[in-house]
Image (cartoon, rainbow, N blue to C red):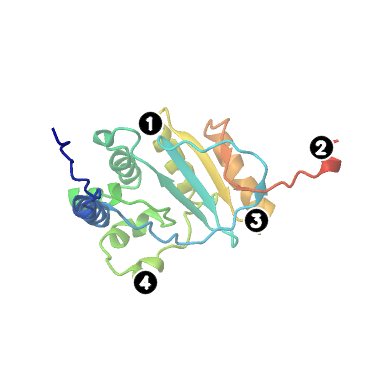
Amino acid sequence: MPKIKIPHKTPRIDMTPMVDLFSLLLTFFMLTATFRPNEPAPVDTPFSISEKKTPDANIMTITVANDGRVFFDVDNGHDTILHFRNKILKEMGTHYNIEFTPEELRKFEKGSSPFGVAIQDMKTYLNTDDPNERMAFEKGIPIDSLDNQFAYWVLYTRTVNPAVQTLVKGDAQTEYPAIKKVLDELQEKGVKQFNLITNLEKIEVTQENAE
């Protein structure tokens, strides 16, 4: 009885489904991704060798530019339904007799970059859509003895979110008195612990150092 020969076919891989899946994923990420907003005052942080990572939520960030201007930022915590930013701005408005509309509160809550705006200019700042016009208000948060708005931002942030952690980001060229003033205000408001944001410095280990 003759043997039945089974025809051998060359395997063929159909890449069409994979290409379709890649196109869908690419479209999804393009539609849902948000660009990181430009900081009002670019800061060149100093180098350090610490590898400790900064927390990703429940943080308030104080930025000190190289010209001494102070910027502030705070997030909504792990759960956005708590509306921390919204409540903090309400507290600031109550203290300075400024009533913010629901739309202005929503705009502030959606903010994702540090701001250095005096509370008296905040309404105009929030209602200005042109980025160049908004930059004109970024003169730094007042921190002088006559109108220490920075202290109240820290106070109400810690009141609304007691679990908030503090990050301090200073430019490598910022003069020490400007940084010290911020740190003194933090201690005055009960902030005893904070993290300094730095760039990780690469260390080359040579045979001499290893020995």
Q: Which residue is mark 1?
A: 161
Instruction: Identify which amino acid the numbered label 4 is placed on.
Output: Asn
Near mark 1 (Cα within 10 A), the count class, few <14, some 14-19 or many ≥20, is some
Q: Quadrant of residue 6?
A: top left
Q: Quadrant of residue 209?
A: top right
Of callouts 4 and 2, the N-terminal one: 4
Of callouts 1 and 3, the N-terminal one: 1
Left or right of 130? Residue 71 is: right
- Compared to residue 155, the image places residue 93 above or below, namely below
User: Are the residues tagged 2 and 3 within 8 Å (C-beta)?
Assistant: no
Q: Which residue is mark 3?
A: 172
Q: Which residue is mark 4?
A: 132
Q: CA distance from mark 4 to mark 2?
A: 52 Å
Element type at marker 4? Answer: helix
Task: Residue at 43%, 53% (x, y): give it.
Answer: 114
Left or right of 140? Residue 129 is: left
Q: CA distance from mark 4 to mark 3?
A: 26 Å
Of callouts 2 and 3, the N-terminal one: 3
Q: Nearer the viewer, mark 2 or mark 3?
A: 2
Instruction: Identify which amino acid the numbered label 2 is placed on.
Output: Ala
